[in-house]
Amino acid sequence: QVQLVQSGGGLVQAGGSLRLSCVASGSFSSIKVLGWYRQAPGKQRELVASTVSGGATNYGDAVKGRSTISRDNAKNSVYLQIDSLKPEDTAVYYCNGDFVGVGGFTYRYWGQGTQVTVSS
């Protein structure tokens, strides 16, 4: 079993920045992918950013160019910074990861979610 615990978020003014953190703990042999998704009211969950174990990153179109995902493998942690926030960035943000566990199988886990509200 793997636990992903998120921190950060809250109420932020438009034009400001936010930083989210996520720490993984539990039983796993390695982490393939760590990332962030978000879900706004009435909308589907969408990718914000992800990073694989080799360091490559991928960003959703909505945040490309104004966000940075980073990873600390020693701490099993992933971080997300979004700059130049817009009201449309308001959503619940979820950390997720693909973990290699028992038998070499890959399992996906999700964090508890954290509300980010951007005021105009």
Image (cartoon, grey):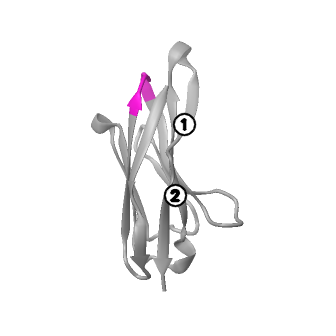
Q: Is residue 60 magenta?
A: no
> Residue 41: which disc?
none
Q: From which residue to which does the magenta span run?
A: 25-30
Which percent across, then down, holds residue 79?
A: 37, 53
Residue type highlighted by circle 2:
Tyr
Furthest-left residue in this view: 74
Furthest-bottom residue in this view: 120
Q: Residues within 10 Å of mark 2 (few under 14, many from 20)?
A: many
Residue at 57% from the left image edge and 21% from the top image edge: 105
Q: Residues within 10 Å of mark 1 (few under 14, many from 20)?
A: some
User: Viewer-proximal residue, 55 or 117?
Assistant: 117
Residue at 49% from the left image edge and 72% from the top image edge: 117
Q: Earlier in the sequence, mark 1 or mark 2?
A: 2
In the picture, residue 11 is in which quadrant?
bottom left
Which percent across, then down, holds residue 37?
A: 55, 54
Q: Residues at badges 1 and 2 in contact (C-beta under 8 Å)?
A: no
Task: Relative to 61, say whether 69 is above or below.
Answer: above
Task: Relative to 59, say whether 31 is above or below.
Answer: above
Residue at 43% from the left image edge and 65% from the top image edge: 67
Residue at 70% from the left image edge and 64% from the top image edge: 43
Which percent across, then down, holds residue 97?
A: 50, 39
Which percent across, then down, holds residue 15?
A: 41, 82
Tell me if 79 is positioned left or right of 111 in this view: left
- Which residue does the numbered mark 1 point to in the structure image? 109
> Residue 93: which disc?
2
In the picture, residue 62 is in which quadrant?
bottom right
